[in-house]
Amino acid sequence: MDQQGPISPPPGTSLRTRLTVPVLAMCGTLMAVMQTVVVPLLPDLPRLTHSSPGAVSWMVTATLLAGAVLTPVLGRAGDMYGKRRVLTGALGLMTLGSVMCALSSDITVLITARALQGAAASVVPLSISILRDELPPERRGSAVAMMSSTVGIGAALGLPLAAMVVQYADWHTMFWMTSALGALGVTAVSWAVRESPVRQPGRFDVQGALGLAVGLVSLLLGVSQGGQWGWGSPRVLSLFLVSVAVLALWWWRQLRTGQPLVDLRLVTRPRVGLSHVAALLTGFAFYANSLVTAQLVQAPKATGYGLGLSIVATGLCLLPGGVTMLLFSPLSARISATRGPRITLALGAAIIAFGYAVRIADSRDLWMIILGATVVATGTTLAYSALPTLILRAVPAEQTASANGVNVLMRTVGQAASSAAVAAVLVHHTSPVGGVLVSTLHGYLLAFAMAGAVALAACAAALTIPGDSAPERTRRAKGRTRGARDEAMEGA
């Protein structure tokens, strides 16, 4: 489907070419670290910023909303104006947000800064698009798998790192660190990554971007705040009604626009659409692992199942999962090359479901908790690495960034839904411990069962994705054989 082959590096840039993949992987990891580092701060931020817990929660919500809106928008902009240019801009906004957080303790400034950091959610789809344009096919699969895995790797590294900084230093130090890393990322991308000439010129759909923003913000705001505001409250119901109305109107207009923000005719093709459905379900199943594990191991020992671990120890429990994602990303690329990404995605979802079965079997012993969480992380590596490969094989080269942006958006929606669903389950299964209501072990097990069932649904969706699932090597060999046969016929 590629309309332009890999670009040969000009003389004198071999070192830069070799550093393209490591630099982009570093940026993806940094993006995930940035999203995670605020979590250990949340319990103390009301005191540090002289604000309410509800206001502080917007430091997470603002990043989620901005990332969901900007990911498809910046993906489309990258296809039109240059992927490296837009990637550098997204990293610049993330760095600016870190500097603002480092300089201020005002909650309004902090929320605004975290919204700016949401632009970094587009780093992974933009980077994957650059890898498609720049790398030869034999290197592309492993590089894309590594890029996809950076989301989990960064999250696993960010939590213990931030916890240690918060425990032993001023909390602003953490944001000075991410500011320095962000500046390094911008500099490295500007130096090591060349701008791709693969473009889809046209006029940017401003009205489509605004309509998508209103629809997504209404949807995700209702999902993320439903537990706090009440699922049947007028505010939440109004948000859902606005979301349905605006997104329906947006869909109708996108089908009638000559240069739409999102090519819905492409999205609704089974190969692309089912990949997006699988991304949503996988995002749901994956996110419950981090949410539930962190709460479970920090629960007081008086509950009978909790381990009473600190936030630093909690982060270290999740660290093996991040290391596993790093180690298993090459395996994911190898399976996709030999069996096809559809099989890799289905296998990953099945392993996620098995990991939750391990969690249900034993969630009292620390080593079993770590084992179950690591198995889920392994399945996530396979699934997340296969999703962009499916998209790359199904869309034209000049629409890679926007298509991958939509796929990442679906993962984000799945994660938001997972957060809301897990919170609803845990809130409805509590018992008093020392005069405080805490979640019961039964509630945690129900959350595991729910996530496992969604993982099985993702597996089923993956197996229904149509299209040529022949191994990539076989298809390239057939192409070479066909070319040689054509040349022989011309010679005859």
Image: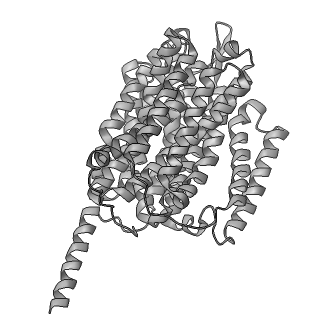
Residue 246 appears anywhere in the view: yes
Q: Residue at x 52, y 20 (%)?
A: 174
> What coloring was used for the rendering?
one colour
Instruction: Determine whether, in the image, residue 237 is placed left or right of residue 482.
Output: right
Q: Is residue 349 above or below residue 199?
A: above
Label total for image: 0
| Residue 204: % across, % down | 64, 62
Q: 137 or 326, which lies in front?
A: 137
| Residue 481: % across, % down | 20, 76
Q: Residue at x 22, y 69 (%)?
A: 477
Q: 39 or 174, which lies in front?
A: 174
Q: Is residue 166 above or below residue 420?
A: above
Q: Which residue is outermost to the front?
A: 12
Q: Which residue is outermost to the bottom?
A: 492
Residue 445 appears anywhere in the view: no
User: Within the image, what quadrant is residue 226 found in?
Assistant: top right
| Residue 273: % across, % down | 53, 61
| Residue 97: % across, % down | 60, 32
Q: Quadrant of the C terminus?
A: bottom left
Instruction: Determine whether, in the image, residue 489 is placed left or right of residue 464.
Output: left
Q: Is residue 54 above or below residue 453?
A: above
Q: Residue at x 22, y 84 (%)?
A: 486
Q: Residue at x 44, y 62 (%)?
A: 197
Q: Is residue 10 above or below residue 450?
A: below
User: Within the image, what quadrant is residue 22 found in?
Assistant: top left
Q: Which residue is outermost to the top?
A: 434
Q: 371 or 406, which lies in front?
A: 406
Q: Quadrant of the N terminus?
A: bottom left
